[in-house]
Image (spheres, grey):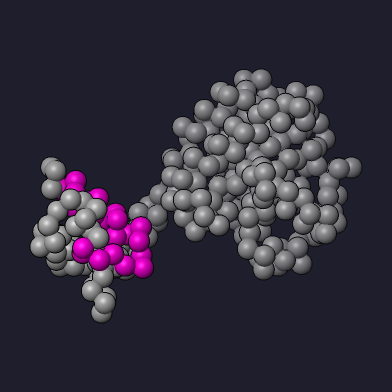
Amino acid sequence: MNTLKKALEMLEEIVVNPSGVRPSSLAKKFGMSLPNAYKYLKVFEEYGFVVKKPDGSYIPSFKIVELSSIILRRLDIRDISVPFLSDLMIKTGQTVHLIMKDGFEGVYVHKIEGANSIPMVSKIGMKMDLYSTSAGKAILAFLPEDELEEYLRSTKLIKKTEKTITDPGRLKEELKIVRERRYAIDDEENEPGIRCVGSAVLNHEGYPIAAVSISGASSKVTMDWIKENAKHVVDCAKKISEKLGYSGGE
C-alpha cells in the first residue's frame, strides 16, 4: 500500500508540473534513491502516463487528458449538485434553482422549494432569459468577451418590469461587478415582487455552464438579507464547480 501511495503521489507531482519534472527532484522530494525514482518513471512511461523529454525531464502525457475527458463526460451536474442545493435551501429557507446554460438561454434543471418562500412559476425544463435573471447574469458575467458581445448583438433586451436592464452598456457594467463579487442580483427585474441571487457554476476550463440561484419574495429577500446570505449562494456554486474540476484559475 505504501508503494501504491507513493506512486500516486509521484504521478500527481508530475501532473501539477506540466513543464517537466526531473528524476533527481522526484527522488529528493519523496526520499528515495535515484535508481528507484527511475523505476517508478519507467512504469509510468510504459503505461503511457508520462513522456520523457529530450532534456531528460518527464511530463504528463495526453493519456491523462483522455482519461480526464471520459470522466468529465460522465459527470451529471444534477447528481453532483443535489447535496449542495439542499444545504443551500436549509441555510437560506428560500427556493433554490439549478439553471443550465443552453445557447443564449437558461434552462431550469433542478428546483427545491424553500420552506419560507412563496410558490414559483418556474418548473423543470422551463427556459429563461439570461439578461433579466440573477442566474442568467451570473452566467453572462463569466462568458468570454467575444461570446458576450455576440449575445448582446443577437439578443433583444425586452423590458419585463420597471427595473429590467435593457441598455447593453449598463448591463455590461453590472456584469463587471457581478464577476468581481461572484454573485448577481435580480432586483425584481424579471418578475415583480421576486428578488433572486445567483452565482455561476464553472467547469474545469472556467466556463460558465450553469448557475445556482435562490428566489424569494422581495419583502423577505431584502438587500440587507442578501448582504448576509449571498455568501451561501457563492459557496454552493463554488463547491459544485470544484466537483466539476474547476480549480480557481481564470
Relative placement, left or right, of 159 versus 132 is right
Between residues 50 and 159, which one lies in front from this camera angle?
A: 50
Q: Is the N terminus in the top left, top right, bottom left or bottom right quadrant?
A: top left
Residue 172 horizontal/vertical position (percent)? 77, 57
Residue 145 shown left or right of residue 190 in the figure: left
Residue 117 on image: x %, y %: 68, 24
**In percent of the image, x 49 and y 33: which residue is there?**
84
Q: Is residue 141 on the magenta stretch?
A: no
Coordinates of residue 26 in the picture (x, y in percent): 23, 58
Q: Is 80 placed above or below 218 here?
A: below
Classified by dominant secondary structure, the portion drawn in magenta counts as helix
Tell me what residue is drawn at x 59 percent, y 38 percent.
234
Name the residue nearer the viewer: 250 or 28: 28
Viewer-nearest residue: 23 or 173: 23
Q: Quadrant of residue 44?
A: bottom left
Could one spot residue 216 in this view of the protein? no
Point out the image quarter for the C terminus.
bottom right
Check residue 14 for magenta coloring.
yes
User: Can you say whether 53 is above or below 194 in the image?
Assistant: below
Which residue is pictured at 13% across the width and 48% down the height?
Answer: 3
Give the x, y percent position of residue 40: 15, 59
- Which residues are the magenta region? 4-24
Q: Nearer the viewer, residue 54 or 75?
A: 54
| 206 relative to 49 in the view: left or right | right
Q: Is residue 54 left or right of residue 204?
A: left
Name, please, the residue furthest toward the top: 116
Figure disc tally: 0
Specify the farthest residue to the bottom. Answer: 54
User: Please, which residue is most extreme toward the right here?
Assistant: 162
Tell me, yes or no, if residue 22 can be seen here: yes
Residue that appears at 63% across and 59% down = 143
Residue 184 quadrant: top right
